[in-house]
Image (cartoon, rainbow, N blue to C red):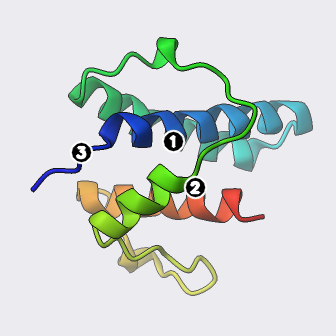
Amino acid sequence: MSYDKMEDFIETIYNVFSSVNVKADSKRDKRLKYIAVLILGYVTKLAKEHAVNLKEIEDPDSINLIPFFEYVAFKDIKLLEFDKVQVEDIDVSKSDDIERFVLSHVYYITQK
């Protein structure tokens, strides 16, 4: 069974990227900029796989996180606890681990 709201999810993740990117630039925060680039790589890959044009996504007044939480629940993704994560917990050769890592960042950034 596939996730049927992928366009909404991609839009949400792209909007999070845009917000994080602007914040990173305004604060000149390199760490936050790296996270933004990581999110952009992830959402760009998804957009390509699902034929979504990121340039057509409009900036919202607020980001709708419902698609994010629905996707995480649908895929049963266990988000990382960054204060407890170990290097060996993430295998960068596995797309599921990369997705988990990126979505964990999205979660923690949006919950601040």
Between discs 3 and 2, the one toward the N terminus: 3
Residue in front for this viewpoint, 99 or 77: 77
Q: Could you tell me residue 79's position as x and y percent?
A: 46, 73
| Residue type, label 2 | Val
Residue in front for this viewpoint, 26 or 19: 19
| Helix, strand or loop for disc 2 | helix
| Residue type, label 3 | Asp
Which numbered dot is residue 13?
A: 1
Which numbered dot is residue 47?
A: none
Dot 3 alpha-carbon crowd within 10 angstroms: few under 14, some 14 to 19, many 20 or more: few
Height in image: 80 above or below 3?
Answer: below
Q: CA distance from mark 3 to mark 2?
A: 21 Å
Between discs 3 and 1, the one toward the N terminus: 3
| Residue type, label 1 | Ile
What residue is drawn where x is 75% and y is 32%?
A: 61
| Helix, strand or loop for disc 1 | helix
Residue labelled with disc 2: 106
What residue is drawn where x is 60% and y is 34%?
A: 15
Between discs 1 and 2, the one toward the N terminus: 1
Looking at the image, is mark 3 or mark 2 nearer the viewer?
A: 3
Q: Could you tell me residue 64's position as x and y percent?
A: 60, 45
Height in image: 48 above or below 1?
Answer: above
What residue is drawn where x is 28% and y is 24%?
A: 48
| Helix, strand or loop for disc 3 | loop
Residue labelled with disc 3: 4
Height in image: 16 above or below 75?
Answer: above
Dot 2 alpha-carbon crowd within 10 angstroms: few under 14, some 14 to 19, many 20 or more: many
Looking at the image, is mark 3 or mark 1 nearer the viewer?
A: 3
> In which quadrant of the rendered image does the C terminus lie?
bottom right
Q: Residue furthest bottom?
A: 84
Q: CA distance from mark 3 to mark 1?
A: 16 Å
The quadrant holding residue 76 is bottom left
